[in-house]
Amino acid sequence: MIEQASLCTLLLALFMTYAIILTYKTLTETNLVKAIIYSAGQAIAYTLALVLLAAPDLVLAYVAVGVGMYTVLFLFVVSRTENHEYESLEEALKAMGVDVDE
Amino acid sequence: MSKSKARENRDITKEIIVAIFASLLIIVFASAILFSGAIAIPPQPTNRPLASFYLRTTYNWEFKWLWSSSPEVVTSILWDHRGIDTVYETGVFFFAIIGALMLIRNYKGGSKYKAVGMSIIARSVTKITLVSIPVIALSIALHGHLTPGGGFQGGSVFAVSTLLVIIALGLGFFIERGWTKHRLLGLHTLGIMIIGFIALSLPIIGFFRSYCGYIMQNQWKPWSPLGLGYVFNLFGIEILYSGSLLFLNLAGFLAVSAGLTLAFIALALPKEDIRKGGGLDD
């Protein structure tokens, strides 16, 4: 049987790896709604890591803010603008049908 | 044709990888809880000096001149040891809400919103959670001095339920029940004012009775004999309320829940109604 503390450390490493992967996906995703969902997944991974670190006070605040409010707030903001993140200004203008010659 | 097929295959491979990762996560976590009872890293046999100082003084009945009369060390540190810091945090939150209100300063109100939302299934589920989430939020805030949690945590859990209402039942649900901008801002300000009143109560009492009293003081000290007490006697049953901590938690709950609800209502208002107030195009 594995010792409890080392098992917890292993799980912690697993959750933090998930968090890093999801953060990377959030940064590189160009579809903003998908990026927000990746960000919420990162918040869930952080929540589980905080549970393992025995910080229930932080967990209660982090679940409500990170998963609930933060996600919905950004969904509100995205619903008021466009769903796609452009690489550059020229690309955005081209997508809108504006002529950029020079 | 083959190109799109290759893309489809790649998508399926991606989904399979994601599914394997997700199921691995669940299996590992569940088996860890089942087989070793590992939910959190267990307390270490030796604590660092700072941690042992707080653990020894926060709820030590033999050193009452050092304690804050609450077994919850985090809440004691937040509202007693570094209480003024938390008061300033609440002030920052107040100004953030005022900043959010700037966005809807032209909104006059008075429009009728029908309580239209999502389908009947989503509405029914939301109505069930609408009972349970505020109860849990209030219990987190009320037990903030005994178990993990507190005013801010309870308030933000409550705000999640208002978000659910705005999404699933529609904004009209609040407007019909008279949750206007001014009432919510009034509740928010009331919470802030209660915090300020409790913070200043002991210096003011001490001023009139010629004792020494500090801002955000909770329990008595040898050089400052004023305190807010810690046990409430209800028909022979002694209830620990930990001095100012219970009241500060409740006031914080009121301020945070009303403020966040206000911010969400402000964000969810239709653009046309805010434009109708005029003055935004200047």
Image (tube, grey):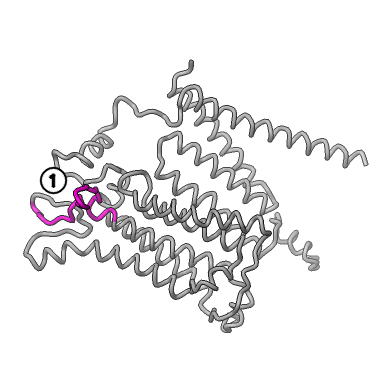
Q: Is residue B17 left or right of residue B134?
A: right
Q: Position of residue A93 (x, y in %)?
A: 75, 64
Name the residue at 24% across, 61% down: B199
Q: Position of residue A88 (x, y in %)?
A: 70, 57
Q: Residue furthest top?
A: A1
Name the quadrant containing residue B268: bottom right
Q: Residue furthest left?
A: B210
In the rendered image of this protein, does residue A80 appear above or below residue B141?
Answer: below
The chain that hosts pointer 1 is B
Q: Magenta region: which residues?
A: B223-246
Q: Position of residue B25 (x, y in %)?
A: 59, 31
Residue that carries the numbered disc 1 in the rendered image: B65
Q: Is residue A50 left or right of residue B61?
A: right
Q: Residue furthest right?
A: B1
Quarter placement of the C terminus of chain B: bottom right
Q: Secondary structure at mark 1?
A: loop
Name the residue at 53% across, 69% down: B174
Amino acid type, residue under disc 1 in the picture: Trp
